[in-house]
Amino acid sequence: MLDIFSSTKKLGAGRFRLTHKRHGAKIFGVTLAVGALLVAGGFIAQNIVSAANYNITPYSTLDEFENGWTLNGAQSANTPTIIQNNADQFKTGTGALKITADSGNVVVDKTVSLDMSATNTLSYWLYIPTQTDLSQIYNIALYFFDSGSTFFMHQSYGTALHIGWNNIIIPKSSIATTTGASWNNPITRLRVRLNVVIGSTSPTFFIDNMQIGGIDRPKVLFTFDDGWDSQYSEGFQYMKSKGLTGTAYMIGDKVDTSGYMTSPQAAEMYNAGWDLGVHGATALTTLGSVADQKNEIQLNQKWLTDRGYTCAANHYAYPNGAHNTDSLTALQDLGFQTARTIIDRNQAGDLDEPLLLTRQQVRGDSTPAAIKTKIDNAVASGTTIILNYHRIVATVADNSMEVSVSDFREIVDYAATLAGQGDLDVMTISDWYNGLVGAQSCRATTGINPPSGGPTGGNPANPAPGAPNTGLSTELDTISLAIAGGLTVITLAGVVVIGNKLFATGTR
Ligand SMILES: [Ca+2]
């Protein structure tokens, strides 16, 4: 059975969901249509065998926030406004629910009759217009009442949100509940409650597209900031022993200085399949203009591109997490594909704001058990967890910058075990992004090199990321060129050639 990226469906403004098709009968019709549009080169169509499509189980829409919502209360003397089906910002359908507070908390309800007993995941979208709005939102709580007084509740805190669209995906099992509430009961009322920061004026946000039941392929990204030498000596070496690769966001002019990686070490990591992304030593928000921010970003990007480390040269990590609207403009102008913040939340596999990726910090005083729980939540909710490390040391002296070797290894072991069981994939940032948008892997030209694990939990025939597939690639390239431009369907042992595209079959 093939796993192929078969269609891209646009859901409302800017949202793409990549749909998984697993049935051989459907593959050929779709693929022939796509293949006819492509020009064959001397490479393998990597996107088909990589994790091009992360959605495994489709989501079902629970509410469009377009009707039935009523203002149910606010703090006295306040006059909030709600507008449902507001088209200023929305994800799906024709509008979203826009809520504007007036210096106090706001409660908005909708009477429903929903059976949520059989679903596991819950997702919804929040749009925060400006940084000022964000700074005035303490949290946004979603309630699911199964009676007049018992309910489930999930809160998104302002500190875990960013401006623009936030795709919140959570396992239903992680939602707080009152005593007596049960998902086996019909849900009779939905509630959205905005709790504002004391002293706020009139924060606005939008909520749209509540969905249940969907699951995307879970991912773990090990990311490391600054290019410290222990990222080579421990991070790279230990992950290599487990067949895993990670992402180091580099500060160009720190390389070959005391405490940081050497040039040969960086080269070894890159050549072994690691991503080297762009970081820096200067917080962008300390720079006065878009042009100044661009210069700082490009300075560090140049260190990578000068050396041919191009796979993740369009992936950025904000120094200190600091960013503003000028930063977004600068990165967008420069063609960056992702930028990682220091907002701690699991990242949706359905890309929300690519220049505002979230992370999960791993600190010296983070217990391995707590990090494992976050990984478990990623598995349960079908999200991506972008782990963020700095130095890995024998004895931790700085909790914000250092993690012990033993704690680090425990998490690597855990991720490797789950990947080996087919529960998740461990990948680099470029493979994650390219797979998500349906582009081929950066390293595809050396053979069939999918991210570790494969799209449905591991194809033992696939080599490690970055490692050439010595058994197939040369032969496949030859066949690819020979049939360029045609629509012939050829099936070899373990390989399907359709038109000018090639697909490796597995045991999936
Ligand atoms: Ca809607």
Image: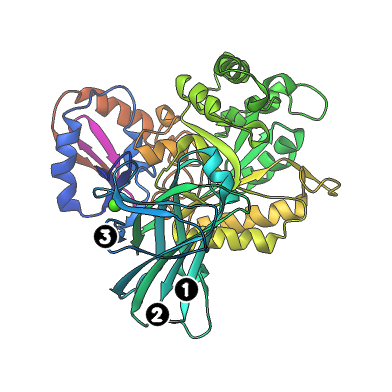
Indicate which disc, 3 or 1, sits on the residue closer to the N terminus: 3
- Real-space Cα separation, disc 3 to disc 2, in angstroms: 20 Å
Residue that label 3 marks: 67
Q: Which residues are magenta?
A: 496-508
Residue 481 x, y percent position in the rendering? 25, 23
Q: Amino acid at mark 3?
A: Asn
Foreground: disc 3 or disc 1: 3
Residue 24 x, y percent position in the rendering? 19, 52
Q: Amino acid at mark 2?
A: Asp
Mark carried by residue 186: none
Foreground: disc 3 or disc 2: 3
Say above or below: 56 vs 340.
Answer: below
Verify whether residue 498 appears in magenta: yes
Residue that label 2 marks: 146
Residue sitting at 74 percent across and 24 percent down? 262
Q: Amino acid at mark 1?
A: Phe
Q: Tell me, yes or no, whether the two marked residues, 1 and 2, touch with CB atoms within 8 Å.
A: yes
Q: Nearer the viewer, residue 74 or 439?
A: 74
Residue sitting at 69 percent across and 24 percent down? 282
Disc 1 is placed on an element classified as strand
